[in-house]
Image: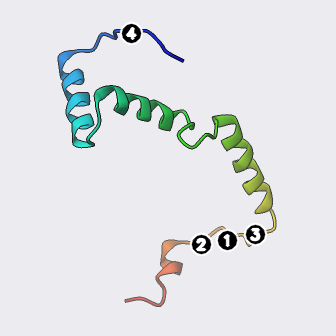
Amino acid sequence: MATSPTTIQLDAETAHAITVYARTLGLTVEEYLRRHVATNNGTDDGTDAAQWLRDLDELAAASDDAAVLPADFSTRDIYLDHD
């Protein structure tokens, strides 16, 4: 699907930061923004946010029988056998 270009208004500092960061990744600004939007919308791997939440709920339900740590569990308990 071809789209017509859209202009967005950014302050010079933000525009420069985006440009520099995209270049450090070896990307054009357009490609960097596309990847960034896809990643932050949960679509970079074809999974939408709703599916991600369903998967997370399924994982949580599967852990209902998992061992529960005592209420007074601390990091000290983890490192008890260390100096």
Quarter of the image with the N terminus in it:
top right
**Mark closer to the observer (2, 3):** 3
Position of 20 with respect to 81 (left or right) is left
Residue 76: x and y in percent read 48, 78
Disc 1 or 4, which lies upstream in sequence? Answer: 4
What crowding class fits label 1: few (fewer than 14 Cα within 10 Å), some (14-19), or many (20 or more)? few
Callout 4: SS:
loop
List the residue tagged with mark 4: 6
Q: Is residue 58 above or below residue 66?
A: above
Residue 40: x and y in percent read 49, 35
Q: Amino acid at mark 2?
A: Phe
Residue 70: x and y in percent read 67, 72
Tell me how far mark 2 sits from mark 3, CA to CA: 16 Å
What crowding class fits label 3: few (fewer than 14 Cα within 10 Å), some (14-19), or many (20 or more)? few
Callout 1: SS:
loop
List the residue tagged with mark 2: 73
Disc 4 or 2, which lies upstream in sequence? Answer: 4
